[in-house]
Image: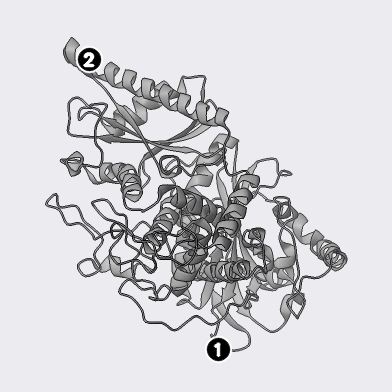
Amino acid sequence: MVGSEVLISPRQHGVTKPLSLAGPSVADLLRTKKLNQFLVDAGLYESKEETAKREEVLSRIKQIVVDWVKQLTRVRGYTDQMVEDANAVIFTFGSYRLGVHGPGADIDTLCVGPSYVNRDEDFFFVLHDILAGMEEVTELQPVPDAHVPVMKFKFDGISIDLLYASVSLLVVPDDLDISEVSVLYDVDEPTVRSLNGCRVADQILKLIPNVEHFRTTLRCLKYWAKKRGVYSNVTGFLGGVNWALLVARICQFYPNAIPSMLVSRFFRVYTQWRWPNPVMLCEIQEDELGFAVWDPRKNPKDRTHHMPIITPAYPCMNSSYNVSTSTLRVMSEQFLFGNRICEEIELNKAQWSALFEPYMFFDSYKNYLQVDIVAANTDDLRSWRGWVESRLRQLTLMIERDTLGKLQCHPYPHEYSDPSKQCSHSAFFMGLQRKQGEVIQEGQQFDIRGTVDEFRHSVNMYVFWRPGMEIYVSHVRRRQIPSYAFSYGSKRIRLSRNGNQQSSVEVSRKRKAEEEEACVERKRQSLSPQSRDSVSPVIVNHSCDGDSQSSEEDVRGVHGQGFEAQKPKVQVETVVSSRMEAGELEQNAVMRLGVSSTA
């Protein structure tokens, strides 16, 4: 409805009353139309042909797993009738189930099979071998030790993440209702986690007032999160289900709002949210099955969570347990950025494109950690990179721990690759800065050599390690960022003292000077053979010398003392990065769940 007239919502959505029942104005309708067009122009919707291909691939996978279960049923000596009735069911979850997937996105799938077909042997060995022998299947990667065990592969070019759950049924019906609690009877924790993705997706769609408005808003905010570098569960930010739950809560707060309103309210609400107050779509359910649910009153570990976003299906869990102090800080800054841009859009001072400006990561810090990952071939690199990336969050936590939170680490969830290297190579970067407001003395150092050693030791415990799999952790200053990092659409944009972007001529001149200055350093960074136990320690030094101090000089000065007596070290000057300033937050009364009642 257009105008300020209040719409009466037929029922309450969520654990609290709505913050507003107002419908859209004429201006809101126009902004939503422009937002929809922007998302279409950005290529966020797949073609009808790709949609049809996905459906065909899912149908093929369904037939493969049914044949697999029938084969196992026959091998284990069951009757002919049992073999005929044997069945497996494929469910989808994640972005595909929620209806917000885009071109090239993977399909999160769950195979539910009978009680006598297990995960460890039947799924990860028998089914794995069946898939490995199929011409349509490529890049097959089993990850049995993951928190949620998964088999990753491409089927006819479509990326698939396949989970498996064995339920307490001899025959799995095609109409199995996975939302029923009875499906959890007599199953283990990994099976519960595997089932939870589908159960959560179904609950989200049931708990929101308008599915289409939810989908458009979520599609928009996922795109925004990727552009701003805060979309990655594995590195300590938020993944697909986290963003879906945050958006769903906004839909509950504003049941009659349309997408442009919901995007604006999203940033308005979460810039004022008092973390670690939890985001919940419904009350946490207790059940006699005895599975642990998120409850900081009973579980001390739950009290350590920084940004609780609780799943709505039993057993309710914190979906964002990966978030650290550092990554919460980064996301809070980005929420402030989004809120400021949305305010300008509502005042007709900005267009939607301004909201999706890429985050200039390599211009935000003066010092970085560079994590290089190499392997003998692309297949080895795929598994090795996945393992290392899953451990990068631990490096962030270790740095926070060992510096008492005074040295902040910003992991950037983007993978880079140097095409000039003869071996298969990937690189990740982390921004370093001291905590804002910390009073330190000139020359004070954060020695994180032991931290880096500990991290590398934990990474090298990889049980599937193969010769050629190596990791190198090194310090680079801003001007020493390797050139290949800027071939992925990133730019070096300097801000003048008054905050305005400098002219393209100035940027080009500075870029050229920086490239010349760092030429020798980039050549030196070519990976040289090292033993698996070699170290790349870092000492973080807060000096006043700026970037003029050479990293190579620091290393030489220490090497003169002898490698055995003193490990090589690099002095790093960390400074507070320039961030976009946001206006003061409104000081409103805080609701029980942590958000201002006037949001």
Rendering coords of residue 480 (x, y %)? 73, 63
Q: Eyeballing the image, is 576 above or below 201?
A: below
- Sequence-wise first label, 2 or 1: 2
Closer to the camera in the image, 562 or 386: 386
Q: Residue at x 79, y 63 (%)?
A: 518
Rendering coords of residue 185 (x, y %)? 16, 41
Residue 226 lies left or right of residue 71; in this view the side is: right
Query: Image quadrant of residue 578?
Result: bottom right
Residue 137 makes an appearance in the image? yes
Q: What secondary structure is marked by label 2?
A: helix
Q: What secondary structure is marked by label 1?
A: loop
Give the number of callouts. 2
Which label is found at residue 439? 1
Q: Residue at x 46, y 27 (%)?
A: 55
Which label is found at residue 429? none
Query: Image quadrant of residue 413?
Result: bottom right
Furthest-top residue in this view: 80
What amino acid type should be assigned to the residue bearing mark 2? Val
Q: Mark 2 touching mark 1, by CB under 8 A?
A: no
Query: Image quadrant of residue 98?
Result: top left
What amino acid type should be assigned to the residue bearing mark 1? Val
Furthest-left residue in this view: 288
Query: Label 2: few (<14), some or many (≥20) within 10 Å?
Result: many
Closer to the camera in the image, 569 or 108: 108
Which label is found at residue 83? 2
Query: Label 1: few (<14), some or many (≥20) within 10 Å?
Result: few
Residue 347 lies left or right of residue 239; in this view the side is: right
Rendering coords of residue 160 (x, y %)? 46, 34
Separation (CA) of disc 2 from disc 1: 72 Å
